[in-house]
Image (spheres, rainbow, N blue to C red):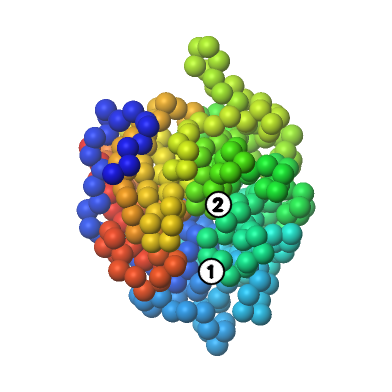
Amino acid sequence: MKIPPFPKSDSITSFKLTGRFKNYTNADTWYPTWADDDNLYSPWTDGYILDEPEYIPFDDDKVEEGYPCNSLDIFGRKAATAQGKIIGDDPMNLEVINLKPRIEASPKPYEGRYPAGSLVYNGVWYYGTYCVDSDGHPTLPDWVTLGPLVGFRISHDYGMTWEESPLPPDKPLFGENPYKAKVKMGTPHFVDFGKNMEHSPDGKAYFVGHGSVREDADNTWIRGDQIYMARVTPSIETINDVSAWEFFAGHDGNSTAIWSNDFADIKPILEWEGHLGCVTITYNAPLKKYIMAISCGHKPKYYDTMFLEADSLTGEWRLIRYYEQFGPTAYFVNIPTKFISEDGKTFWIIYSANWDEKSAVGDPEGSQYSLSIHEVQIS
């Protein structure tokens, strides 16, 4: 058992999956944002929106039925990302609707381009993408090189039409290039502050990602050394303007967070060499707690997931629960605020699992290559 180097939580001492779960779709990369129209909106990719409970491999004969999408140039299609609307208040009875069009966007000079950082705020959807590379081997499943966040496309009509980001992969928003220095803001996600960001502490959108600074770090889409944070007042004018962003740059002598407009000043909010990875944060309003979920892939079929809590976005972060081989290959684990109970002690986690063996038996039960949603109780 790995022993995380973080203090244990003394306010959340029990974290248990109840065994209630439901799977939707044959696709991954689901992390919904709760919009002002009371629906959830999420990116998705690498699959179909189908009702079948079991995974179905890509089949272009199903183009009209399931609208297949994948995020690299393969199967005669260009790299693309997709999006969906999730309707309903009961996690066991949701309706997932695909929102066309699938959007093709070149990953060059990288090999893959995937969804990242999705936020619907005041009726505008900001949808980011990030790149990955496999050092010349596009069939290599681990995407050994974590590439940069490119920028954000924008929709004014809840995903029906889109304006593409003005930023290309070789001139990304934060200026990162993995072949000059390890990426720090990798596979980033917006903090979930509730419906239309109602619980943001200052009206800003906060953004978290993972990365490394070590030259020899194994810095992939699912593994890294540190967690980093940025923030912006979201608008059409600011979202793709790096000068409008601020980056966490440490604490002063009074433990007050320092924010800088210079990306070079960015400092981690959490560190554990080789044991961090994909990160999401949700604000649990009834408990007045932030809950962080991190998944780290050590090798195929061996991803660990841990949950931490804090009173402040920049920490101190305290460990709630560490799961070895969760999924056993679970990733993009997140807690949608829409399904947090009134007392904050029951909620649901969403993730996808077992991309490397899509017919594998899940652990915990029900973990699947899908929008897989599981109930959790804490005390």
Mark 2 is on which residue type?
Thr
366 to 240, vertically: above or below: below
What's the residue at 38%, 57% (across, down)? 302
What crowding class fits label 2: few (fewer than 14 Cα within 10 Å), some (14-19), or many (20 or more)? many
What's the residue at 38%, 61% (across, down)? 301
How many numbered circles are shown?
2
Tell which of 178 and 153 is nearer to you. Answer: 178
SS at mark 1 in the image: strand
Tell which of 38 and 379 is nearer to you. Answer: 379
Closer to the camera: disc 1 or disc 2?
2
Mark 1 is on which residue type?
Asp
- Residue 42 lies, in percent from the top left, at 52, 58
Instruction: Say whether residue 150 is visible.
Output: yes
- Residue 161 lies, in percent from the top left, at 67, 63
Rendered-image quadrant of the N terminus: top left
Q: CA distance from mark 1 to mark 2?
A: 18 Å
Q: Is 120 on the left or on the right of 163, as rendered?
A: left
What crowding class fits label 1: few (fewer than 14 Cα within 10 Å), some (14-19), or many (20 or more)? many
Residue that label 1 marks: 46
Specify the quadrant of the image occupied by residue 8. Answer: top left
Residue that label 2 marks: 220
SS at mark 2 in the image: loop
Q: Between disc 1 and disc 2, whose residue precedes?
A: 1
Tell which of 312 and 364 is nearer to you. Answer: 364
Rendered-image quadrant of the C terminus: top left
